[in-house]
Image (spheres, grey):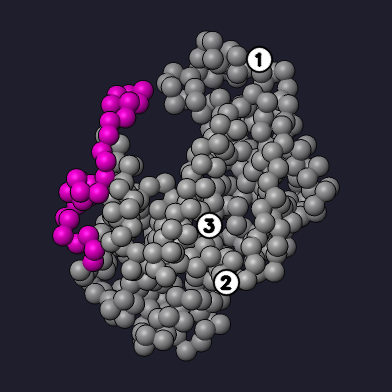
C-alpha cells in the first residue's frame, strides 16, 4: 500500500476480522506511540507493540498473528541483517497462524530485497525450498560482477522481476493513495540552486588536488573520506575528529526564504553537522521541523507543515520516497517539495538516479496491482 494510506489500521482490522486473539506488532521505535494510538482506535484488541531492536525482550510466545511494520527493513542482501536472524528465531518460537507485512516500499532498490523478508517465516512460503539467498539467487537473479575501488564484487541487484512478481503477487494487497482518497496528490517539486562561498570552492579544489584541507587539518587518506568530505563541504559543513565545523550557511538562508513563503516546513538533512548548523541558525523557530534523513524518513508525520525541504540528499531510494510523504495526509491535494542544490555539489546527479528509481517504483506498483485484478 502506498504511504499514508492507513496500513496500520488496515492490518489491525484485518487481524481482528480473522479472529486473532493476541497480536505482536513489530515496528520502528519512533512509530510505537502512533501504533498504540491506532490500536486504541480499533478497540477490543490484545496487541503487544515492540520495536525490532527490543524483540528479544518479548517473553510471551503465544501470538496468533505477527504484524511486521516497515518490512522493507528486513530486505538486506546477500547476507541477512542481525534483525532478520533475531526475528527468524522469534518466529520459530511463536509459530503464528498469520504474518502480515506492511510497507509502502517493499523493494525500493531491487526485487532481491524480497528473499530475507520471507526468510523469517516459520512455515511454507513461495521461496521456502531455497535455504539461503545464494541458492535463491541462482534461480532469480542475474548475478554480475561490479568493480569498486577496493576490488571486484558480485552484484546481486539485478533480480528477475517478472519471474519473482508472478510468484509473489497473490500474497500482496496493493492500494494507491488515489484508491484510498479518490483523488491524486500532486507533488510540486522545485529545484533551487544555492551558490556557496569562495572559501568552500577553494577547499573543494584543494581536497580534489591534494587530498587534504590544510586550514581544517583534514586528511582524506581514503577514497571514502574524500567522497564524504566533498558531499558535506558542498553543503557548507564538515565533521572532523568528532567536531562539527560550520563553514557556510547559504543553504540555511535559502530555507529561511522558503519559510517566509510557506510558513511551517520540514527540513531533511543528511549529516550531523548539517543538523547542528540548522539548529543554530533557526534557534527556537517553531516553523522549522528538523529531521535527519535516515532516522526521520519513517514514522514521523507533520501534517501542519506546508512544505518539505531537502537540505541535502541521501543515496537511498527508500529514504527519499518515505521522506517525501511526511506531510501527506487525506485532504491535502498539493505537497510542495524543495531541493537545495549547491553550485559545486553532486546533489543533482544523485537526484537523477533517484528519479529514475522512483519512476520505476511507480510503474512497478501499477503493474503489480494489474496482476491482482
The residue under label 1 is: 202
Q: Return the disc, 3 or 1, that comes first in the chain's sequence.
A: 1
User: Quick one: 300 or 53, which is closer to the camera?
Assistant: 300
User: Quick one: 56 or 49, which is closer to the camera?
Assistant: 49
Q: Residues within 10 Å of mark 3 (few under 14, many from 20)?
A: many
The residue under label 2 is: 180
The residue under label 3 is: 298
Helix, strand or loop at mark 1:
helix
Q: Position of residue 153 (x, y in %)?
A: 28, 31
Q: Residues within 10 Å of mark 1 (few under 14, many from 20)?
A: few
Q: Residue furthest top?
A: 210
Q: Return the disc, 2 or 1, that comes first in the chain's sequence.
A: 2
Q: Position of residue 197 (x, y in %)?
A: 73, 22
Can residue 33 be seen in this snapshot?
A: no
Q: Are marks 2 and 1 in contact (CB under 8 Å)?
A: no
The boundaries of the magenta stretch are 125-153
Membership of 149 in magenta stretch: yes
Disc 2 from disc 1: Cα separation? 51 Å
Amino acid at each position: 500500500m502506498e504511504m499514508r494510506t492507513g496500513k496500520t489500521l488496515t492490518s489491525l482490522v484485518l487481524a481482528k476480522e480473522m479472529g486473532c486473539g493476541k497480536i505482536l506488532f513489530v515496528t520502528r521505535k519512533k512509530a510505537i506511540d502512533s501504533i498504540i494510538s491506532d490500536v486504541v482506535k480499533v478497540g477490543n484488541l490484545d496487541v503487544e507493540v515492540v520495536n525490532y531492536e527490543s524483540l528479544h525482550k518479548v517473553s510471551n510466545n503465544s501470538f496468533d498473528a505477527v504484524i511486521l511494520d516497515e518490512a522493507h527493513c528486513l530486505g538486506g542482501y546477500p547476507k541477512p541483517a542481525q534483525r532478520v536472524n533475531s526475528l527468524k528465531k522469534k518466529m520459530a518460537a511463536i509459530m503464528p497462524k498469520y504474518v502480515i507485512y506492511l510497507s509502502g516500499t517493499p523493494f525500493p532498490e531491487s526485487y532481491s530485497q524480497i528473499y530475507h523478508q520471507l526468510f523469517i517465516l516459520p512455515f511454507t512460503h513461495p521461496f521456502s525450498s531455497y535455504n539461503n539467498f545464494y541458492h535463491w539467487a541462482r534461480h532469480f537473479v542475474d548475478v554480475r560482477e561490479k568493480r569498486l575501488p577496493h576490488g571486484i564484487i558480485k552484484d546481486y541487484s539485478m533480480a528477475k522481476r517478472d519471474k519473482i512478481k508472478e510468484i509473489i503477487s497473490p500474497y500482496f494487497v496493493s492500494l494507491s493513495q488515489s484508491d484510498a482518497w479518490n483523488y491524486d496528490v500532486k507533488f510540486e517539486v522545485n529545484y533551487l540552486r544555492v551558490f556557496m562561498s569562495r572559501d568552500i570552492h577553494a577547499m573543494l579544489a584543494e581536497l580534489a588536488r591534494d587530498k587534504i584541507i590544510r586550514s581544517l587539518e583534514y586528511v582524506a587518506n581514503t577514497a571514502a573520506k574524500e567522497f564524504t568530505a566533498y558531499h558535506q563541504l558542498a553543503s557548507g559543513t564538515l565533521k572532523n575528529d568528532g567536531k562539527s565545523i560550520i563553514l557556510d550557511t547559504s543553504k540555511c538562508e535559502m530555507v529561511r526564504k522558503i519559510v517566509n513563503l510557506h510558513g511551517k516546513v520540514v527540513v531533511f538533512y543528511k549529516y550531523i553537522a548539517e543538523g547542528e548548523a540548522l539548529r543554530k541558525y533557526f534557534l527556537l523557530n517553531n516553523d522549522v521541523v528538523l529531521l535527519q534523513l535516515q532516522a526521520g524518513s519513517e514514522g514521523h508525520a507533520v501534517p501542519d507543515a506546508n512544505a518539505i525541504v531537502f537540505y541535502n540528499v541521501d543515496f537511498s531510494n527508500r529514504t527519499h520516497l518515505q521522506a517525501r510523504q511526511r506531510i501527506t495526509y487525506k485532504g491535502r491535494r498539493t505537497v510542495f517539495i524543495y531541493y537545495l542544490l549547491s553550485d559545486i555539489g553532486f546533489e543533482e546527479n544523485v537526484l537523477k538516479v533517484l528519479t529514475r528509481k522512483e519512476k520505476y517504483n511507480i510503474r512497478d506498483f501499477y503493474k503489480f496491482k494489474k496482476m491482482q485484478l
